Image (spheres, grey):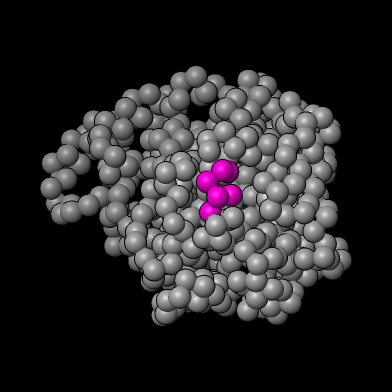
């Protein structure tokens, strides 16, 4: 295949959660619709929501979402560096999809410029295979203490020779100060790389902004290329500042997800959010539990610390009380599944060095011991739910797809496994998970993504509650996301000067 030498455009923001991820996704979908081959890219992502590629490599889910918008398969080249926070001051550093090591913030800051060759190679690989590469920055490009060694904002723009658009969030207020202040703090060379500004998340009649935009363009010396309306979209967002955790609604079927301090891969539950008659709530205090029909313990990047938190906060006692009173079903995914066992052991400090030799009592709802090992399990899987008993017995025989990403191995519950799955990398088949009357668990992220699984679970929960199951109209989840990407693209075409944006991309810097 002839190398394409694709053109680049970079989206930077005035701050985290300004809308960079969705803007990149929307531009990827617009370019795809216009007949171009396009790929997203983010040199360094900090997130606990991660994904496993077909090759068994780990990358941030934001770039997976953007790849879906572009209509291409996710590749680790789209996110060569992933930082997964393990505590307040350190992260697991993943380079090219493989775990490198755990590093403190100071240690990583001193080391990160050594990763520039990996970043450059990944970007050039994508550029050689695509007409366009749309690059996402991180946070703000004018964090003064970080600028000298930047590899994700203006430093990345230099590597890619990419013109830059800067987006600000008007919904939080102060958008004119955000954009003017950002331009003021840029170096002259960096200012020249900025080709336009974007105002995001506007509610109301945008003509009232006209005078402000005129002043902004005069002070910043850059054109405003779009005022994007606030959009209600059911697409994945960055996990650190998501609005999902605050959503509350009343419904016949109430599902609670425990919001661990280190919650990861909460995208496992997105499918539940838009079903009439079902509420999905994230809770972090015992008083918020209420009377749910199902409690989900999600994945976590720090099983030990989050199990301690569950215990010390009083949440564990409340969950167990509801279980013993047979008030609800309990379902654990990955780290949450491990917590449901009898014991968790980390002899070598595989999860975190300070946990070496540690062992914690689990919640005791599954006859299982989990031992952490240095090697991380990373693979995509397909399979079926075994013939099981309990509330969800009608799941028996239904197909599942997803991926595993965990460091612990669990033993002791083999006689009551939930699924039979095939590792798509090795081809090895195995049984995993747990199923009983009220307690279920699985290592498979994405186990809920098939609408047949969710519909069957809703009917089972309604039957147990003695109510008529709500009428469930669940679109195929992939089809639903495609509709959301098209809606996003339509909004960007209406709100942005796409003709000028094409000119900016093609002219470069």
In which quadrant will I find the N terminus?
A: bottom right
Instruction: Pinpoint residue 84: horizontal percent, then vertical percent.
Output: 63, 39
Question: In the image, what residue occupies the spot 38% across and 24% down?
Answer: 185
| Residue 317 located left or right of residue 345 | left
- Magenta highlight range: 316-322
Residue 169 higher or lower than 256, as above or below: above
Which residue does the image show at 70% across and 65% down from the upper left? 435
Taking the magenta stretch, the answer to whether it contains residue 319 is: yes
Q: Residue at x 18, y 54 (%)?
A: 204
Task: Provide residue 152's location: percent of width, then percent of height.
Answer: 55, 36
Picture coordinates of residue 99 (x, y %)?
75, 40
Q: Is residue 36 above or below residue 284?
A: below
Magenta part, dominant SS:
helix
Does residue 476 lie above or below 249 as drawn? below
Residue at the front extreme?
325
Q: Is residue 204 left or right of residue 301?
A: left
Q: Is residue 176 visible?
A: yes
């Amino acid at each position: 295949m002839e190398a394409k030498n694709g053109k680049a455009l970079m989206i930077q923001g005035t701050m985290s959660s300004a809308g960079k991820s969705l803007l990149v996704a929307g531009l990827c979908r617009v370019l795809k619709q216009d007949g171009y081959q396009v790929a997203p890219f983010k040199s360094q992502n900090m997130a606990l929501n991660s994904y496993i590629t077909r090759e068994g490599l780990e990358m941030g889910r934001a770039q997976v979402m953007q790849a879906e918008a572009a209509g291409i398969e996710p590749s680790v080249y789209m996110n060569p560096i992933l930082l997964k926070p393990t505590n307040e001051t350190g992260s697991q550093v993943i380079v090219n999809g493989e775990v490198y090591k755990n590093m403190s913030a100071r240690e990583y800051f001193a080391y990160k410029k050594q990763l520039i060759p990996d970043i450059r190679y990944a970007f050039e690989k994508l550029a050689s295979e695509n007409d366009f590469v749309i690059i996402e920055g991180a946070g703000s490009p004018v964090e003064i203490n970080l600028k000298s060694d930047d590899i994700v904002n203006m430093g990345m723009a230099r590597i890619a020779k990419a013109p830059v658009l800067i987006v600000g969030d008007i919904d939080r207020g102060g958008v004119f100060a955000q954009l003017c202040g950002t331009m003021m703090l840029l170096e002259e060379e960096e200012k020249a790389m900025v080709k336009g500004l974007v105002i995001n998340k506007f509610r109301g009649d945008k003509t009232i902004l006209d005078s402000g935009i005129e002043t902004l363009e005069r002070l910043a010396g850059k054109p405003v290329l779009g005022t994007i309306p606030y959009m209600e979209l059911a697409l994945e967002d960055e996990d650190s500042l998501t609005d999902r955790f605050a959503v509350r609604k009343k419904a016949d079927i109430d599902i609670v997800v425990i919001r661990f301090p280190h919650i990861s891969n909460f995208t496992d539950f997105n499918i539940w959010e838009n079903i009439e008659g079902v509420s999905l709530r994230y809770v972090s205090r015992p008083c918020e539990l209420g009377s749910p029909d199902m409690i989900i313990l999600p994945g976590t990047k720090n099983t030990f610390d989050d199990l301690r938190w569950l215990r010390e906060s009083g949440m564990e006692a409340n969950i167990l009380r509801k279980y013993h009173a047979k008030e609800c079903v309990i379902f654990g995914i990955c780290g949450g599944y491990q917590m449901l066992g009898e014991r968790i052991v980390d002899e070598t400090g595989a999860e975190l060095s300070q946990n070496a030799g540690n062992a914690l009592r689990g919640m005791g709802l599954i006859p299982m011991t989990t031992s952490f090992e240095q090697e991380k399990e990373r693979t995509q899987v397909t399979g079926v739910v075994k013939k099981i008993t309990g509330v969800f017995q009608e799941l028996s025989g239904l197909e599942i797809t997803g991926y595993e990403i965990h460091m612990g191995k669990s033993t002791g519950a083999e006689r009551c496994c939930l699924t039979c799955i095939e590792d798509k990398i090795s081809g090895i088949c195995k049984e995993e998970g747990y199923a009983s009357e009220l307690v279920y668990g699985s290592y498979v992220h994405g186990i809920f993504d098939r609408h047949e699984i969710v519909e069957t679970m809703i009917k089972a929960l309604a039957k147990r509650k003695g109510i008529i199951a709500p009428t469930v109209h669940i679109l195929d989840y992939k089809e639903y996301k495609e509709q959301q990407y098209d809606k996003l693209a339509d909004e960007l075409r209406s709100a942005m000067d796409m003709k000028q944006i094409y000119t900016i991309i093609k002219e470069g810097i």
